[in-house]
Image (cartoon, rainbow, N blue to C red):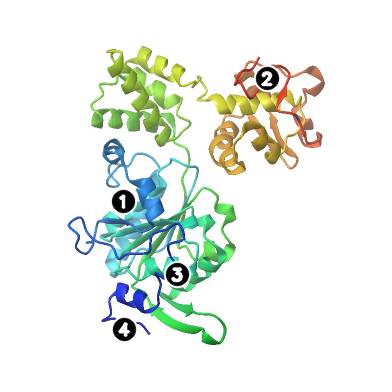
Protein backbone atom coordinates (compact mmCIF):
# COMPACT_ATOMS: atom_id res chain seq x y z
CA UNK A 1 0.00 0.00 0.00
CA UNK A 2 1.20 3.50 -0.76
CA UNK A 3 2.34 5.16 2.44
CA UNK A 4 0.61 8.54 2.78
CA UNK A 5 3.91 9.96 3.96
CA UNK A 6 5.47 9.16 0.62
CA UNK A 7 5.24 11.80 -2.08
CA UNK A 8 3.36 10.90 -5.26
CA UNK A 9 6.55 11.27 -7.27
CA UNK A 10 8.42 8.97 -4.90
CA UNK A 11 5.64 6.42 -5.09
CA UNK A 12 5.71 6.53 -8.87
CA UNK A 13 9.47 6.18 -8.89
CA UNK A 14 9.13 3.06 -6.76
CA UNK A 15 6.79 1.65 -9.39
CA UNK A 16 9.09 2.69 -12.26
CA UNK A 17 6.21 4.55 -13.88
CA UNK A 18 8.67 6.60 -15.93
CA UNK A 19 10.21 3.47 -17.36
CA UNK A 20 9.67 3.35 -21.12
CA UNK A 21 7.47 6.42 -21.03
CA UNK A 22 9.40 8.29 -23.70
CA UNK A 23 7.82 6.66 -26.71
CA UNK A 24 7.27 10.00 -28.37
CA UNK A 25 6.19 11.44 -25.01
CA UNK A 26 7.92 13.01 -22.03
CA UNK A 27 8.00 11.07 -18.78
CA UNK A 28 5.55 12.27 -16.17
CA UNK A 29 6.76 14.94 -13.76
CA UNK A 30 4.90 16.19 -10.68
CA UNK A 31 3.12 19.53 -11.14
CA UNK A 32 4.59 22.81 -10.05
CA UNK A 33 3.23 26.28 -9.61
CA UNK A 34 4.24 29.30 -11.64
CA UNK A 35 7.24 29.87 -9.38
CA UNK A 36 8.38 26.25 -9.60
CA UNK A 37 6.77 25.29 -6.29
CA UNK A 38 3.86 22.97 -5.68
CA UNK A 39 0.68 23.76 -7.61
CA UNK A 40 -1.96 25.46 -5.46
CA UNK A 41 -5.74 25.25 -5.43
CA UNK A 42 -7.45 27.13 -8.22
CA UNK A 43 -4.56 26.65 -10.66
CA UNK A 44 -4.36 24.40 -13.70
CA UNK A 45 -2.07 21.52 -14.63
CA UNK A 46 -2.09 20.25 -18.20
CA UNK A 47 -0.55 16.97 -17.19
CA UNK A 48 -0.01 15.44 -20.62
CA UNK A 49 2.92 17.11 -22.41
CA UNK A 50 1.46 16.62 -25.88
CA UNK A 51 -1.91 18.08 -24.95
CA UNK A 52 -0.31 20.79 -22.85
CA UNK A 53 1.59 22.04 -25.87
CA UNK A 54 -1.58 22.11 -27.93
CA UNK A 55 -3.60 24.11 -25.44
CA UNK A 56 -1.12 26.81 -24.52
CA UNK A 57 -3.39 29.71 -25.22
CA UNK A 58 -2.61 32.92 -27.00
CA UNK A 59 -3.24 36.00 -24.94
CA UNK A 60 -6.44 36.70 -26.92
CA UNK A 61 -7.78 33.22 -26.22
CA UNK A 62 -7.07 33.52 -22.53
CA UNK A 63 -8.78 36.89 -22.31
CA UNK A 64 -11.89 35.70 -24.13
CA UNK A 65 -12.38 32.57 -22.04
CA UNK A 66 -14.98 33.13 -19.27
CA UNK A 67 -13.41 32.87 -15.83
CA UNK A 68 -16.53 32.05 -13.81
CA UNK A 69 -20.21 31.19 -14.11
CA UNK A 70 -21.21 34.85 -14.16
CA UNK A 71 -19.17 35.48 -17.31
CA UNK A 72 -20.37 32.33 -19.05
CA UNK A 73 -23.20 33.08 -21.49
CA UNK A 74 -25.84 30.48 -22.38
CA UNK A 75 -26.31 26.82 -21.39
CA UNK A 76 -28.41 27.96 -18.43
CA UNK A 77 -29.65 24.52 -17.41
CA UNK A 78 -26.14 23.09 -17.36
CA UNK A 79 -24.82 26.05 -15.39
CA UNK A 80 -27.64 25.78 -12.85
CA UNK A 81 -27.01 22.05 -12.38
CA UNK A 82 -23.28 22.58 -11.93
CA UNK A 83 -23.84 25.37 -9.40
CA UNK A 84 -26.14 23.14 -7.37
CA UNK A 85 -23.65 20.26 -7.50
CA UNK A 86 -20.81 22.53 -6.33
CA UNK A 87 -22.91 24.07 -3.55
CA UNK A 88 -24.04 20.68 -2.30
CA UNK A 89 -20.49 19.31 -2.33
CA UNK A 90 -19.26 22.29 -0.34
CA UNK A 91 -22.00 21.78 2.23
CA UNK A 92 -20.97 18.15 2.69
CA UNK A 93 -17.24 18.97 2.54
CA UNK A 94 -16.65 16.52 -0.28
CA UNK A 95 -15.59 16.71 -3.93
CA UNK A 96 -18.11 17.47 -6.65
CA UNK A 97 -19.66 14.38 -8.22
CA UNK A 98 -18.16 13.18 -11.50
CA UNK A 99 -19.42 15.13 -14.53
CA UNK A 100 -19.76 14.15 -18.19
CA UNK A 101 -20.07 17.04 -20.65
CA UNK A 102 -21.12 16.11 -24.17
CA UNK A 103 -21.86 18.10 -27.29
CA UNK A 104 -20.33 19.37 -30.54
CA UNK A 105 -16.89 21.02 -30.53
CA UNK A 106 -16.57 24.65 -29.48
CA UNK A 107 -19.53 24.92 -27.11
CA UNK A 108 -17.53 25.41 -23.91
CA UNK A 109 -16.85 21.99 -22.40
CA UNK A 110 -13.23 22.77 -21.52
CA UNK A 111 -14.19 26.20 -20.21
CA UNK A 112 -16.83 24.69 -17.93
CA UNK A 113 -14.30 22.19 -16.57
CA UNK A 114 -11.97 25.07 -15.74
CA UNK A 115 -14.75 27.04 -14.08
CA UNK A 116 -15.91 24.01 -12.09
CA UNK A 117 -12.39 23.50 -10.72
CA UNK A 118 -12.04 27.17 -9.85
CA UNK A 119 -15.47 27.47 -8.23
CA UNK A 120 -14.95 24.30 -6.19
CA UNK A 121 -11.51 25.43 -5.02
CA UNK A 122 -9.54 22.59 -6.58
CA UNK A 123 -6.69 22.40 -9.05
CA UNK A 124 -7.52 21.38 -12.61
CA UNK A 125 -5.44 18.50 -14.00
CA UNK A 126 -6.14 18.07 -17.70
CA UNK A 127 -5.32 15.39 -20.23
CA UNK A 128 -7.03 13.67 -23.16
CA UNK A 129 -8.31 10.20 -23.96
CA UNK A 130 -5.70 9.48 -26.66
CA UNK A 131 -2.90 10.56 -24.27
CA UNK A 132 -3.84 7.83 -21.78
CA UNK A 133 -2.33 5.03 -23.81
CA UNK A 134 -1.53 2.72 -20.90
CA UNK A 135 -2.68 2.33 -17.29
CA UNK A 136 0.61 3.77 -16.04
CA UNK A 137 -0.20 7.03 -17.87
CA UNK A 138 -3.34 7.32 -15.77
CA UNK A 139 -1.60 6.29 -12.55
CA UNK A 140 0.93 9.07 -13.00
CA UNK A 141 -1.88 11.62 -13.02
CA UNK A 142 -3.97 10.08 -10.25
CA UNK A 143 -0.97 10.03 -7.91
CA UNK A 144 -0.65 13.80 -7.98
CA UNK A 145 -4.30 14.57 -7.16
CA UNK A 146 -5.14 16.31 -3.91
CA UNK A 147 -8.49 16.27 -2.18
CA UNK A 148 -11.07 18.24 -4.16
CA UNK A 149 -9.00 18.45 -7.36
CA UNK A 150 -10.61 18.07 -10.77
CA UNK A 151 -9.28 15.66 -13.39
CA UNK A 152 -10.42 16.78 -16.84
CA UNK A 153 -10.23 14.23 -19.66
CA UNK A 154 -10.99 15.62 -23.09
CA UNK A 155 -12.16 13.18 -25.79
CA UNK A 156 -12.94 10.75 -23.01
CA UNK A 157 -14.66 8.42 -25.49
CA UNK A 158 -11.17 7.62 -26.81
CA UNK A 159 -9.81 6.30 -23.51
CA UNK A 160 -8.54 2.73 -24.14
CA UNK A 161 -10.53 -0.05 -22.50
CA UNK A 162 -7.63 -1.11 -20.26
CA UNK A 163 -7.31 2.42 -18.88
CA UNK A 164 -11.08 2.82 -18.59
CA UNK A 165 -11.25 -0.19 -16.28
CA UNK A 166 -8.77 1.46 -13.91
CA UNK A 167 -10.97 4.54 -13.86
CA UNK A 168 -13.95 2.51 -12.62
CA UNK A 169 -12.48 1.88 -9.17
CA UNK A 170 -10.80 5.28 -9.09
CA UNK A 171 -14.17 6.97 -9.61
CA UNK A 172 -16.14 4.78 -7.22
CA UNK A 173 -13.71 3.83 -4.46
CA UNK A 174 -10.88 6.36 -4.89
CA UNK A 175 -8.42 3.52 -5.10
CA UNK A 176 -6.89 1.30 -7.76
CA UNK A 177 -4.89 -1.92 -7.86
CA UNK A 178 -1.94 -1.24 -10.12
CA UNK A 179 -0.30 -4.32 -11.66
CA UNK A 180 3.45 -4.24 -12.21
CA UNK A 181 5.30 -6.75 -14.35
CA UNK A 182 4.07 -9.81 -16.20
CA UNK A 183 3.65 -13.49 -15.51
CA UNK A 184 5.22 -14.89 -12.35
CA UNK A 185 6.96 -11.59 -11.61
CA UNK A 186 3.71 -9.62 -11.65
CA UNK A 187 2.70 -7.92 -8.44
CA UNK A 188 -0.33 -5.85 -7.51
CA UNK A 189 0.14 -2.59 -5.65
CA UNK A 190 -2.96 -1.08 -4.02
CA UNK A 191 -3.04 2.69 -4.41
CA UNK A 192 -5.31 5.02 -2.46
CA UNK A 193 -6.32 8.21 -4.27
CA UNK A 194 -7.44 11.46 -2.74
CA UNK A 195 -11.16 12.08 -3.39
CA UNK A 196 -11.45 13.98 -6.68
CA UNK A 197 -13.95 14.88 -9.38
CA UNK A 198 -13.58 13.51 -12.89
CA UNK A 199 -14.90 15.75 -15.65
CA UNK A 200 -15.08 14.07 -19.03
CA UNK A 201 -15.72 15.88 -22.30
CA UNK A 202 -16.93 14.13 -25.43
CA UNK A 203 -18.37 14.87 -28.82
CA UNK A 204 -19.45 11.23 -29.13
CA UNK A 205 -21.33 10.26 -25.98
CA UNK A 206 -22.69 7.14 -27.66
CA UNK A 207 -19.18 5.68 -27.87
CA UNK A 208 -18.81 5.52 -24.09
CA UNK A 209 -19.50 2.10 -22.65
CA UNK A 210 -22.61 1.82 -20.49
CA UNK A 211 -20.65 0.97 -17.30
CA UNK A 212 -18.37 3.96 -17.80
CA UNK A 213 -21.19 6.39 -18.49
CA UNK A 214 -23.16 5.13 -15.49
CA UNK A 215 -20.36 6.19 -13.14
CA UNK A 216 -20.90 9.88 -13.87
CA UNK A 217 -23.27 11.44 -11.36
CA UNK A 218 -24.05 14.37 -13.64
CA UNK A 219 -24.42 14.09 -17.42
CA UNK A 220 -24.87 17.40 -19.22
CA UNK A 221 -25.39 17.83 -22.95
CA UNK A 222 -24.36 21.20 -24.33
CA UNK A 223 -26.44 22.45 -27.24
CA UNK A 224 -25.75 24.99 -30.01
CA UNK A 225 -26.31 28.56 -28.89
CA UNK A 226 -29.23 30.70 -30.05
CA UNK A 227 -28.32 33.83 -31.99
CA UNK A 228 -29.13 36.19 -29.11
CA UNK A 229 -26.66 34.39 -26.82
CA UNK A 230 -24.01 34.49 -29.54
CA UNK A 231 -24.59 38.23 -29.98
CA UNK A 232 -23.82 38.70 -26.28
CA UNK A 233 -20.70 36.55 -26.61
CA UNK A 234 -19.47 38.46 -29.67
CA UNK A 235 -20.12 41.82 -28.01
CA UNK A 236 -18.25 40.73 -24.88
CA UNK A 237 -15.32 39.43 -26.92
CA UNK A 238 -15.22 42.63 -28.97
CA UNK A 239 -14.95 44.69 -25.79
CA UNK A 240 -12.13 42.51 -24.48
CA UNK A 241 -10.31 42.76 -27.81
CA UNK A 242 -10.87 46.53 -27.85
CA UNK A 243 -12.65 46.24 -31.18
CA UNK A 244 -15.51 48.81 -31.39
CA UNK A 245 -17.88 46.48 -33.21
CA UNK A 246 -21.35 47.86 -33.91
CA UNK A 247 -24.55 45.99 -33.08
CA UNK A 248 -25.36 45.08 -36.69
CA UNK A 249 -21.90 43.58 -37.21
CA UNK A 250 -22.17 41.58 -33.98
CA UNK A 251 -25.50 40.11 -35.06
CA UNK A 252 -24.20 39.26 -38.52
CA UNK A 253 -21.28 37.36 -37.02
CA UNK A 254 -23.60 35.60 -34.57
CA UNK A 255 -26.05 34.55 -37.29
CA UNK A 256 -23.30 32.89 -39.33
CA UNK A 257 -21.42 31.19 -36.50
CA UNK A 258 -23.19 27.81 -36.59
CA UNK A 259 -24.40 28.20 -33.02
CA UNK A 260 -20.81 27.92 -31.80
CA UNK A 261 -18.92 30.50 -29.68
CA UNK A 262 -15.54 29.26 -30.91
CA UNK A 263 -16.58 29.94 -34.49
CA UNK A 264 -18.03 33.33 -33.54
CA UNK A 265 -14.77 34.41 -31.90
CA UNK A 266 -12.80 33.19 -34.92
CA UNK A 267 -14.96 35.29 -37.23
CA UNK A 268 -14.65 38.29 -34.91
CA UNK A 269 -10.86 38.14 -35.08
CA UNK A 270 -10.95 38.15 -38.86
CA UNK A 271 -13.27 41.17 -38.84
CA UNK A 272 -10.85 42.92 -36.49
CA UNK A 273 -7.92 42.04 -38.77
CA UNK A 274 -9.65 43.46 -41.84
CA UNK A 275 -10.67 46.57 -39.93
CA UNK A 276 -7.13 47.24 -38.72
CA UNK A 277 -5.30 46.46 -41.96
CA UNK A 278 -7.65 48.44 -44.21
CA UNK A 279 -8.30 51.13 -41.59
CA UNK A 280 -12.05 50.60 -41.73
CA UNK A 281 -14.60 50.80 -38.97
CA UNK A 282 -15.60 47.32 -37.72
CA UNK A 283 -19.17 47.82 -38.86
CA UNK A 284 -21.71 45.69 -40.73
CA UNK A 285 -20.06 46.29 -44.13
CA UNK A 286 -16.62 45.32 -42.84
CA UNK A 287 -18.02 42.21 -41.13
CA UNK A 288 -19.84 41.17 -44.31
CA UNK A 289 -16.66 41.69 -46.34
CA UNK A 290 -14.55 39.66 -43.90
CA UNK A 291 -17.02 36.77 -43.91
CA UNK A 292 -17.21 36.82 -47.70
CA UNK A 293 -13.42 36.59 -47.88
CA UNK A 294 -13.64 33.52 -45.63
CA UNK A 295 -16.23 31.95 -47.93
CA UNK A 296 -18.95 32.06 -45.26
CA UNK A 297 -22.43 32.48 -46.75
CA UNK A 298 -25.71 33.59 -45.21
CA UNK A 299 -26.39 30.07 -43.90
CA UNK A 300 -23.03 29.86 -42.15
CA UNK A 301 -21.78 27.40 -44.77
CA UNK A 302 -18.11 27.32 -45.69
CA UNK A 303 -16.36 25.70 -48.64
CA UNK A 304 -16.30 22.15 -47.25
CA UNK A 305 -20.01 22.33 -46.38
CA UNK A 306 -20.86 23.36 -49.92
CA UNK A 307 -18.56 20.70 -51.39
CA UNK A 308 -20.29 18.09 -49.24
CA UNK A 309 -23.77 19.16 -50.33
CA UNK A 310 -22.71 19.41 -53.96
CA UNK A 311 -21.29 15.89 -53.89
CA UNK A 312 -24.55 14.58 -52.47
CA UNK A 313 -26.48 16.56 -55.08
CA UNK A 314 -24.45 14.89 -57.82
CA UNK A 315 -25.60 11.54 -56.44
CA UNK A 316 -29.08 12.43 -57.77
CA UNK A 317 -30.99 11.28 -54.71
CA UNK A 318 -28.97 8.15 -53.97
CA UNK A 319 -27.65 7.76 -50.42
CA UNK A 320 -23.89 8.19 -50.03
CA UNK A 321 -22.03 6.27 -47.33
CA UNK A 322 -19.83 8.08 -44.81
CA UNK A 323 -16.66 6.36 -45.97
CA UNK A 324 -17.29 7.35 -49.60
CA UNK A 325 -18.09 10.90 -48.57
CA UNK A 326 -14.94 11.19 -46.45
CA UNK A 327 -12.76 9.93 -49.30
CA UNK A 328 -14.34 12.34 -51.76
CA UNK A 329 -13.87 15.35 -49.48
CA UNK A 330 -10.42 14.40 -48.24
CA UNK A 331 -11.61 14.59 -44.62
CA UNK A 332 -11.72 11.98 -41.88
CA UNK A 333 -15.02 10.31 -41.06
CA UNK A 334 -14.86 11.73 -37.53
CA UNK A 335 -14.39 15.27 -38.85
CA UNK A 336 -17.40 14.98 -41.12
CA UNK A 337 -19.59 13.57 -38.34
CA UNK A 338 -18.42 15.93 -35.60
CA UNK A 339 -17.65 19.19 -37.41
CA UNK A 340 -19.66 19.50 -40.60
CA UNK A 341 -22.76 17.33 -40.35
CA UNK A 342 -24.26 18.72 -37.11
CA UNK A 343 -24.79 22.17 -38.63
CA UNK A 344 -26.11 20.76 -41.91
CA UNK A 345 -28.56 18.54 -40.03
CA UNK A 346 -29.76 21.42 -37.84
CA UNK A 347 -30.32 23.57 -40.92
CA UNK A 348 -32.26 20.76 -42.59
CA UNK A 349 -29.81 20.54 -45.49
CA UNK A 350 -28.86 16.92 -44.90
CA UNK A 351 -30.82 13.74 -44.29
CA UNK A 352 -29.23 10.63 -42.72
CA UNK A 353 -30.61 7.20 -43.48
CA UNK A 354 -29.35 3.69 -42.67
CA UNK A 355 -27.92 3.63 -46.20
CA UNK A 356 -26.09 6.94 -46.02
CA UNK A 357 -26.46 10.70 -46.50
CA UNK A 358 -28.82 12.51 -48.86
CA UNK A 359 -29.10 16.22 -49.56
CA UNK A 360 -32.54 17.72 -48.94
CA UNK A 361 -34.39 20.19 -51.14
CA UNK A 362 -33.41 22.95 -48.69
CA UNK A 363 -29.79 21.87 -49.05
CA UNK A 364 -30.02 22.06 -52.81
CA UNK A 365 -31.44 25.57 -52.61
CA UNK A 366 -28.59 26.55 -50.27
CA UNK A 367 -26.01 25.73 -52.96
CA UNK A 368 -28.09 26.97 -55.89
CA UNK A 369 -29.12 23.55 -57.17
CA UNK A 370 -32.50 22.00 -57.94
CA UNK A 371 -33.42 18.36 -57.56
CA UNK A 372 -34.24 16.49 -60.73
CA UNK A 373 -37.90 15.58 -61.08
CA UNK A 374 -37.12 11.85 -61.02
CA UNK A 375 -35.57 12.10 -57.54
CA UNK A 376 -37.99 14.58 -56.05
CA UNK A 377 -39.67 12.54 -53.34
CA UNK A 378 -38.07 13.09 -49.91
CA UNK A 379 -40.02 10.12 -48.55
CA UNK A 380 -38.11 7.87 -50.93
CA UNK A 381 -34.73 8.66 -49.28
CA UNK A 382 -34.51 5.45 -47.29
CA UNK A 383 -35.20 3.25 -50.31
CA UNK A 384 -32.45 4.64 -52.51
CA UNK A 385 -29.25 2.71 -52.97
CA UNK A 386 -25.92 3.81 -51.63
CA UNK A 387 -23.88 5.69 -54.19
CA UNK A 388 -20.30 4.49 -54.72
CA UNK A 389 -19.88 7.71 -56.82
CA UNK A 390 -16.92 9.47 -58.22
CA UNK A 391 -15.39 12.64 -56.84
CA UNK A 392 -16.38 14.66 -59.89
CA UNK A 393 -19.83 14.59 -61.47
CA UNK A 394 -22.34 16.99 -62.93
CA UNK A 395 -19.80 19.75 -63.43
CA UNK A 396 -18.66 19.79 -59.78
CA UNK A 397 -14.97 19.31 -59.09
CA UNK A 398 -13.87 18.75 -55.53
CA UNK A 399 -10.29 19.18 -56.60
CA UNK A 400 -10.77 22.77 -57.72
CA UNK A 401 -13.41 23.72 -55.19
CA UNK A 402 -15.84 24.87 -57.88
CA UNK A 403 -19.47 23.96 -58.40
CA UNK A 404 -22.30 24.82 -60.74
Q: Counting residues from the N terminus, which is met first, the one under dot 2 or under dot 1?
A: 1
| Label 1 to label 3: alpha-carbon separation | 28 Å
Task: Quarter of the image for the C terminus: give it.
Answer: top right
Label 1 SS = helix
Residue 11 placement (x, y as % from top left): 34, 77
Q: Nearer the viewer, residue 228 or 404?
A: 404
Looking at this view, name the residue that lies furthest to the bottom.
184
Residue 347 placement (x, y as % from top left): 57, 29
- The answer, for residue 118, to whether it is visible in the render is yes
Which marked residue is nearer to the observer: mark 4 or mark 1? 4
Q: Counting residues from the N terminus, which is met first, the one under dot 4 or under dot 1?
A: 4
Q: Which residue is mark 1?
A: 115
Q: Are marks 3 and 4 in contact (CB under 8 Å)?
A: no
| Label 3 to label 4: alpha-carbon separation | 19 Å
Q: Are marks 3 and 2 in contact (CB under 8 Å)?
A: no
In this rendering, the answer to whether 396 lies above or below 391 is: above
Which marked residue is nearer to the observer: mark 2 or mark 1? 2
Residue at 45% in and 70% down:
136
Residue at 46% in and 33% down:
259
Label 2 SS = strand
| Label 4 to label 2: alpha-carbon separation | 67 Å
| Label 3 to label 2: alpha-carbon separation | 50 Å
Which marked residue is nearer to the observer: mark 1 or mark 3? 3
- The answer, for residue 282, to whether it is visible in the render is no
Q: Which residue is mark 2?
A: 396
Q: Counting residues from the N terminus, which is met first, the one under dot 3 or under dot 2?
A: 3
Q: Which residue is mark 3?
A: 136
Looking at this view, name the residue that lies furthest to the left.
35
| Label 2 to label 1: alpha-carbon separation | 46 Å
Amino acid sequence: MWDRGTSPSGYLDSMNVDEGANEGRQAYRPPTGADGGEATAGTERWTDPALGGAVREREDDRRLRPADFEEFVGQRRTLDNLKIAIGAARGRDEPVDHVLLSGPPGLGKTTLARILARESGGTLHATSGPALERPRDLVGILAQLRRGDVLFVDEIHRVPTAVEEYLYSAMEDFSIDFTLGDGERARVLPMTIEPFALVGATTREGLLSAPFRARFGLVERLVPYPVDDLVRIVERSARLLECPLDAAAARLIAERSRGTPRVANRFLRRVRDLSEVHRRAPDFATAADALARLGVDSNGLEDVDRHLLAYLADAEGRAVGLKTLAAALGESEDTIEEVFEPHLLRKGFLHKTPRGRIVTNAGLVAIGRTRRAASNDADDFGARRTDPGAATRGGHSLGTGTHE
